[in-house]
Amino acid sequence: MIAGSRLHPSFDYSQPTFDLIVASPLFSGAWAPVHALILAGLILVTAGLSGLARSGLLSGAALGAARVAVAGAALSALEMTFHLVAFIERDAAVADRPTPLVDIHQALQVPSHPLLGFAVATLAVLESRRLRGSALDWPWRIATAIGVLGAVAHGLAGPLTILTRDAKFGSLFAGAGPMALYLGLYALAASRFQSGARREAAESVSAAV
């Protein structure tokens, strides 16, 4: 997802209408491989978040946020499938003919982006103190801040761009990169989180005895 967001074909903002601006990158030869890469990333994110939700590491509000994020990631993967094949309709898009694939992917962006982005932002805030007391506490908080900002931007990108039909909001789609970076760092830190959770559980048992 990080690479995909960086490699996404650029929009031609000189075009006179929203539809022509968003259709402009469909003519790039990079469209299909870049969006296939993003789709693969979303599938991995869905699997990773699903595993996290079932791991027993989370509870309460954090578990709820993870479950919502799973739904958002799965819906985002479905949206990206239509997004990927939208280049088939590039000639129709610039000729103002029907574009059902483009219409479906744009419609799915409105709910899928907030579901994934805001849920990941919520999860990040709730998990921001996982490493408190350790040498990695502040680096983790910085990573959390980056993840929250990226996730919120991602959550706003779809609905703001599609509902306002203002392509200038397209810059918010870049939030997917920092959001994906945070999720990757979380995956790397998960074993440490598990160790901390086991230690806290053992200390609770010892205190009870």
Image (cartoon, rainbow, N blue to C red):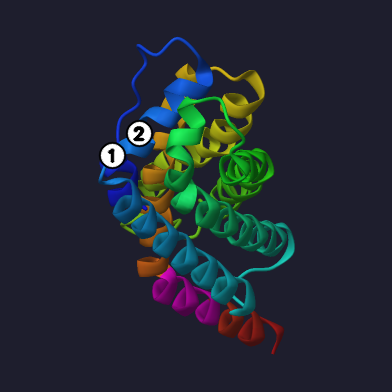
Q: Is residue 195 above or below residue 177?
A: below
The answer to if 195 sits in the magenta stretch is yes
x, y (%) of residue 156?
Answer: 58, 32
Residue under label 1, please give it.
28
Residue 132 is drawn in which quadrant? bottom left
Q: Secondary structure at mark 2?
A: helix
**For the residue carrying disc 1, how many other residues have a C-alpha within 10 Å: few (<14), some (14-19), or many (20+)?**
few
Residue under label 2, please give it.
25
Amino acid marked by disc 1: Ser
- In the image, which disc is placed on residue 192? none
Tag 2–tag 1 contact (CB < 8 Å): yes
Amino acid marked by disc 2: Pro
The answer to if 84 sits in the magenta stretch is no
x, y (%) of residue 206?
Answer: 62, 86
x, y (%) of residue 152?
Answer: 54, 36
**The C terminus lies in quadrant:** bottom right
Depth check, front residue: 105 or 112: 105
**For the residue carrying disc 2, how many other residues have a C-alpha within 10 Å: few (<14), some (14-19), or many (20+)?**
some
Alpha carbons under labels 2 and 1: distance apart: 5 Å
Depth check, front residue: 103 or 201: 103
x, y (%) of residue 20?
Answer: 46, 22
